[in-house]
Image (spheres, rainbow, N blue to C red):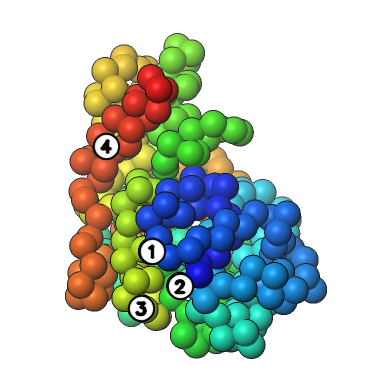
Amino acid sequence: MRIAVLGSAGQLGRDLCPRLAGEVVPLTRADLDLGNTAGVPAALAAARPDVLVNCAAYNFVDKAETEPEAAFAVNAWGVRALAQACAAAKVKLVHFSTDYVFGLGAARTTPFTEGDAPGPVSAYGISKLAGEYAARTFAPDALVIRTCGLYGVHGSGGKGGNFVETMLRVAGQGKPLRVVADQHCTPSYTVDVATATAALIARGASGLFHVTSAGSCTWHDLAAETFRLAGVAADLTPITSAQFGAPARRPPFSVLSNAKLAAAGVATPREWRAALAAYLAERAAARAG
């Protein structure tokens, strides 16, 4: 099986490629640009995959509030073009989505299943939900995977890195940290998401699946546990979403259920604290090497 991975240079793509069974074709934006829908069919034809995994997306949540056209160009219309091209070429499409397709119902306390009605509260979330519908409409055999708050060692550099890396960097600079404590979700380790994704692909799964770490936490919880595990003394203060004042609304509760994943015979990712500990160990080993 020949599997092309779009977004192969990102933190999820780089953990996914070595875990896939078969010949892996890494693709970057230079090879296939979702913002250029006219070029999608030719790029797909050049890659000649049996399966195409789309890890690429417009992920600037706050900027999407003022430039929704840019978010929709990649997350919706680009995915539509990709799904249409995959269907025409008889290529299996695997597409990643987000917990941000939820957000309504602030009083909710039970994890969302794949059968629950979505309700995004940001332009980014709406664009990602539109991409889900496009993928499953134009490529009915598509596998769509929702995940949350990804962090991995390949995302520890660049502009801000991932949330865990950002916390460690700012704490290392001796700066105070004010972190939101009223958004409940499950940030997830890319190694675990990649492992479950590879298993779903190997089983030929289709439809919608949730793949996140187990349990739930707030961003403040994640920061506090990061500092505890890393042995870092940090000036950490919990705040509300209103106090933080981000341009885009975030879901107050977007914990996802992995029950369907387990029912499909795929081992569910470990609990978020164990996953975080594994990430920090991998990060330390990578830096020591």
Whether the residues at callouts 2 and 1 have beta carbons within 8 Å, the answer is yes
Label placed on residue 1: 2
- 215 left or right of 173 in image: left
Label placed on residue 278: 4
Label placed on residue 205: 3
Name the residue: 35% across, 17% down.
Answer: 234
Whether the residues at callouts 3 and 2 have beta carbons within 8 Å, the answer is no
Nearest-to-viewer mark from 1 and 3: 1
Q: Nearer the viewer, residue 47 or 255?
A: 47
- The CA distance from mark 1 to mark 4 is 23 Å
Name the residue: 40% across, 60% down.
Answer: 20
Q: Point out the tag, 1 or 4, that comes first from the N-terminus.
A: 1
Q: What residue did someone put label 1 on? A: 21
Q: Point out the tag, 4 or 2, that comes first from the N-terminus.
A: 2
Q: Point out the tag, 3 or 2, that comes first from the N-terminus.
A: 2
- 136 left or right of 113 in image: right
Which structural element holds mark 4?
Answer: helix
